[in-house]
Image: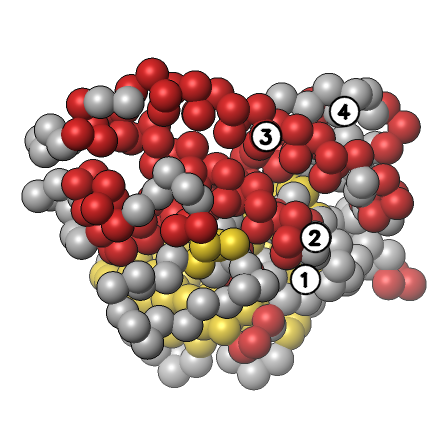
Amino acid sequence: MQNICLQNIVTIRDICDPNSVVDNDKYDIFDAPEIDRINISNLANGENLKGIEYLKQIRFFILKDFENDLITALNSKKFATNIFGGDPICTGSVNLGATNNPIALERGITIHYAKVSKTSLRKIKVKNLKIYSKTTGTFNLKIYDQYNNSLTQIPITLTANAENTIAVDYTIVGEYARFLIDNTNLATNSTTITCFVGCNDTLPNDCGFVTGWNGSTDIKSEGFGITADFSCECDYSYMLCQIPKNYIGKLIWLKFRIEILERSLIGTSRLTNWIVYGKEDRIQLIKDLRKQYEDNWKLLIDGLGDYLQKFEAEGCIDCRKSRQVVNV
């Protein structure tokens, strides 16, 4: 997932606007000596927006890829130990012999973290929901995340007397999240929750547990026609928001420049002097910037030793296996 905290670490000032404010504490793409307004306008061909908007598109693209660079850098030194996530956990099973009749309530399941930590790298990712409907129709799946009381709505179409699989690919941000459907016009099979807290508050696993939601409170064993497949995965992107912004800013600034220069080599329908001439110089500059990018990643990862140790107990980081290689 792309972090909001990274969005404006590298700024794009509007150099045509005399009232544009320059933030001297941040890197700006126009601080790069090879980047100027005319060159960017020439790259923004007829299929793109103005130069400034084109730069915003490029920034969005590189930020999507930036987390992968972090994982690559961690993995190259054997720090990252759980890139692909844990085994999937199913919340329960269907009881085809029992029915939950329609009622004017939102009902479903609540998935809770087994170990709550707002500074944890481990996050619950819900891959799929299975909904056992007795009614055919279109409904809204509502995901209530405890973090900031956020609400996500997904339109779904259900077929009666069938296992309806809904791919949600949702990462729970808060301490829990509820997956509910308005049951006013919906009848479902009963679903029995098996991943719940047992005697003496014992937990079924170290990832999460599940309760049913009857419209007003959590209950122990009824899932109201919904089961889920979830797992705990290491969300290394959390680290990016904790590292000092000047370190991250320089890395994004270098990646931003590399992407622009590489696009200039591909060219556009506008064969300007910048596109046609100076190609060899830009190729060499790209090589130099890539070297700086790799070196800065290495310096950053080398300096994170004490910080990374706090995540070892979660199974996401292993500082003991590190080796001195970084190539992103």
Q: Which residue is mark 2?
A: 243
Q: Are marks 4 and 3 in contact (CB under 8 Å)?
A: no
Residue drawn 83% across the image and 25% down it: 322
How far apart marks 3 and 2 lie (CA) works out to 19 Å
* Badge 4 or badge 3: first in the primary sequence: 4
Q: Is residue 19 above or below residue 5?
A: below
Q: Which residue is mark 1?
A: 112
How far apart marks 1 and 2 lie (CA) works out to 28 Å
Name the residue type under label 4. Answer: Lys
Q: Which residue is mark 3?
A: 292
SS state under label 3: helix
Residue drawn 65% across the image and 72% down it: 219
Q: Is residue 220 above or below residue 254?
A: below
* Badge 3 or badge 2: first in the primary sequence: 2
SS state under label 4: loop
SS state under label 1: strand
Q: Residues within 10 Å of mark 4 (few under 14, many from 20)?
A: some
Name the residue type under label 1. Answer: His
Q: Nearer the viewer, mark 1 or mark 3?
A: 3
Task: Name the spot of residue 261 as percent of width and height, x first.
Answer: 35, 31
Q: Which residue is mark 4?
A: 78
Task: Name the spot of residue 292 as percent of width and height, x first.
Answer: 59, 30
Quadrant in which residue 304 is drawn: top right
SS state under label 2: loop
From the viewer's side, name the closer residue of 161 and 288: 288
How far apart marks 4 and 3 lie (CA) works out to 22 Å
Q: Are marks 3 and 2 in contact (CB under 8 Å)?
A: no
How far apart marks 2 and 4 lie (CA) works out to 19 Å
* Badge 1 or badge 2: first in the primary sequence: 1
Name the residue type under label 2. Answer: Ile
